[in-house]
Amino acid sequence: MNKNAITNPLTLNEIGMEALSKALSPVDVARFLRLYDKGSGDYTKEREQELDGLTMSDIHASM
């Protein structure tokens, strides 16, 4: 396979999984893939709600 940009997501996934399988054991492939779970929700909105009203002093104190 050449190093040109791969535009088809299915092809990219196939090539990526093949590369992982060559480099890692099946258990490590599974562990690696779990690191990149998309999750759910709106991270930006949730973060803004959590940080709403916090000052830099609050953040430093929590460290």
Image (tube, rainbow, N blue to C red):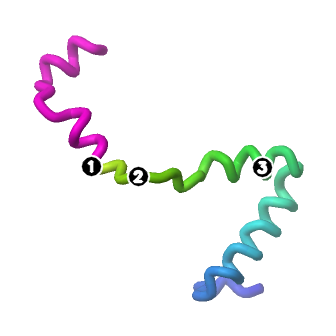
Measure the C-alpha gap from mark 1 to mark 3. 30 Å
Locate residue 1 relative to residue 5 in the image: left or right: right
Q: Which residue is mark 1?
A: 45
Image coordinates for residue 9, horizontal then vertical, percent: 62, 81
Marks 1 and 3 close (CB-CB < 8 Å):
no
At numbered mark 1, what does the secondary structure look like: helix, strand or loop? helix
Other residues around mark 1 within 10 Å, as few (<14) / some (14–19) / many (≥20): few
Quadrant the C terminus occupies: top left
Seen in the picture, residue 1 relative to 56 is either above or below; the reply is below
Earlier in the chain: of badge 1 and badge 3, it is 3
Tell me the magenta residue range: 45-63
Q: Residue at x 11, y 25 (%)?
A: 55
Image marks 1 and 2: residues in contact by CB distance under 8 Å: yes
Is 55 located above or below residue 30 in the figure?
Answer: above
For residue 8, the mark is none
Which circle's residue, 2 or 3, is located before the other in the chain? 3
Q: Nearer the viewer, mark 1 or mark 3?
A: 1
Tell whether position 56 is magenta.
yes
Identify the image quadrant of the N terminus. Answer: bottom right
Disc 2 is placed on an element classified as loop
Q: Which mark is residue 30?
A: 3
How crowded pointer 3 is (Cα within 10 Å; few <14, some 14-19, many 20+) is rated as few
Of 40 and 17, which appears nearest the observer?
40
- Amino acid of disc 3: Ala
Where is residue 42 drawn, in percent x and y? 35, 53
Classify residue 15 by image quadrant.
Answer: bottom right
Identify residue for label 2: 41
Residue at (83% x, 51% y) in the render: 24
Q: Main secondary structure of the magenta part?
A: helix
Tell me what residue is drawn at x 78 percent, y 60 percent.
20
Q: Is residue 31 above or below residue 57?
A: below
